[in-house]
Image: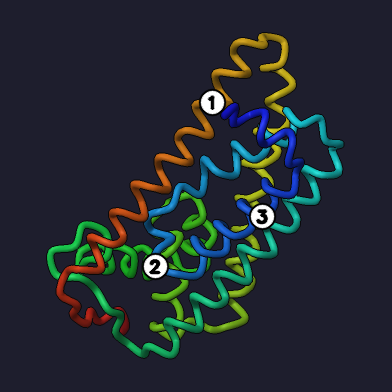
Amino acid sequence: MDLLGWLGANGPFMVWLIVLSFVFLECAFVIGLFLPGDSLLFTAGLVLAQQGTHDVQAWAMSVAATIVAVVGNQLGYHIGKRAGPSLTGRLGGRMLNEERLARARDFLDRRGFWAIVLARWIPWIRTLAPMIAGAAGMDARRYLAATTTGAICWVPTLVLLGYYGAGVLEQFPWLMTTVMVIGIAFFVVGTAWGIWRYRQEMRKPAHLVSVAD
C-alpha cells in the first residue's frame, strides 16, 4: 500500500485525528514518555502541505493541538495533585525511575514558571512536569499560565515549520518524498517501539517516589 497515497485519499481528517490524539496522550499520561510528539507535529505539517490544504488548515491544527496540549497537561497536573506528594516510579525502569523523577523535580525547583514553559521542548520532562507540578502543589493559575505559554510556543512552531518548510522541499520532489517517508516511518516505528518500551516499563516493580518537600 502507498502510505502517502492513502493519506491523500483520506484527506486531512486522519492527520487531525492522529495529531490531536497523540498530543493529548503525550501531555496527560505516563505513556507520553514513549511517544514521538515533536516529530509527529513536524510531519503533520508536511503531510498537510503535501495534501494541498489551505494555510487555514495548518493554522487551525496549530490552534486545536495547542488547546489539546493545554487540556492534556491540566489533566496531568490534576493526576499529580490527587496522587499527593509521591508519584509511582518503577524499580529498574529506564524512563519512570527515581533518578528521572528527581531530575524533573530539580528542574522545576530551579526554574519555576519557566521550567513548565521550557519543558515543552524536553520530551521526557514534558510528560512528567505536569504530574510533578501537581504533586508538589504548584499554584494552579500559575501552572495554567506557564503550560499555556509553553504550548503556544511549542505546537505552532513545529506544525508550521513542517507546513511552510514543505514549500522549499517541493522544489526538489525527490527530497520532499524522502523527507515525508522518513518522517512517517519515524513516527510509525517510534510509536510501535514506544508502546513496547511502555509495556516493558510497566512490568517493573512499582515504588513511590517523593516529589514534594
Residue beneath disc 1: 181
Image-quadrant location for residue 152? bottom right
Residue 30: mark in rendering = 2
In the shown orientation, is residue 35 left or right of residue 211? Answer: right
- Specify how the rendered protein is coloured: rainbow
Crowding around mark 3 (Cα neighbors within 10 Å: few <14, some 14 to 19, many 20+) is few
Cα gap from disc 2 to disc 3, whole angstroms: 20 Å
Q: Nearer the viewer, residue 99 or 11?
A: 11
**Above or below — where is 134 with respect to 170?**
below
Taking the spot 59% from the left edge, 58% from the top edge, the residue there is 150
Secondary element at tag 1: helix
**Above or below — where is 43 with respect to 199?**
above
Crowding around mark 1 (Cα neighbors within 10 Å: few <14, some 14 to 19, many 20+) is some
Q: Position of residue 41 (x, y in %)?
A: 60, 44
Identified by mark 2, the residue type is Val
Q: Nearer the viewer, mark 1 or mark 2?
A: 1
Cα gap from disc 1 to disc 2, whole angstroms: 28 Å
- State yes or no: discs 3 and 1 in contact (Cβ < 8 Å): no
Image-quadrant location for residue 89? bottom left
Tell me which numbered mark, 1 or 2, is placed earlier along the sequence. 2
Taking the spot 66% from the left edge, 34% from the top edge, the residue there is 6
Q: Position of residue 145 (x, y in %)?
A: 64, 71
In the picture, the quarter occupied by the N terminus is top right
Residue beneath disc 3: 17
Cα gap from disc 3 to disc 1, whole angstroms: 19 Å
